[in-house]
């Protein structure tokens, strides 16, 4: 009788690849967290993010405000 699914070595290979992917993902997340703790965002960066979010949910374009501000 012939098996129709993946071989044992294929299943093992997939399991090892998945394990290594998860290990790398955990390491990436840990590096991100450590970097953020070492270099937290500044108040200026927070303000820029908030303004960007406001424009993202606003019907008006930041370009309109930029034009008005640059004329002053």
Image (spheres, rainbow, N blue to C red):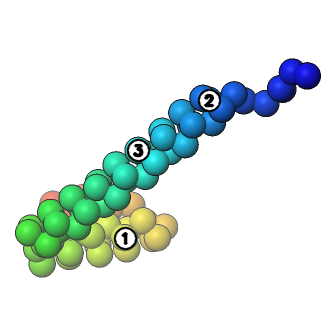
Q: Is residue 66 visible?
A: no
Q: Is residue 19 visible?
A: yes
- Secondary structure of the residue carrying tag 2 is helix
Quarter holding residue 67? bottom left
N-terminal of the pair, mark 1 or mark 3, is: 3
At horizontal 42% and vertical 65% (from top left) the residue drawn is 56
Please determine whether, in this image, residue 12 is positioned above or below residue 55: above
Q: Nearer the viewer, mark 1 or mark 3?
A: 3
At horizontal 20% and vertical 76% (from top left) the residue drawn is 47
Residue receiving disc 3:
20
N-terminal of the pair, mark 2 or mark 1, is: 2
Give 17 or 48, whichever is nearer the viewer. Answer: 17
Give 43 or 11, whichever is nearer the viewer. Answer: 11
x then y, percent, for residue 40: 13, 72
Q: Nearer the viewer, mark 3 or mark 2?
A: 2
Residue receiving disc 1:
53
- Secondary structure of the residue carrying tag 3 is helix
């Amino acid at each position: 009788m012939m098996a129709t699914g993946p071989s044992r070595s294929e299943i093992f290979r997939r399991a090892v690849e998945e394990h290594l992917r998860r290990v790398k993902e955990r390491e990436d997340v840990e590096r991100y967290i450590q970097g953020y703790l070492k270099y937290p965002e500044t108040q200026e960066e927070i303000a820029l993010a908030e303004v960007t979010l406001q424009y993202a949910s606003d019907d008006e374009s930041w370009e309109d405000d930029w034009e008005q501000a640059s004329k002053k």
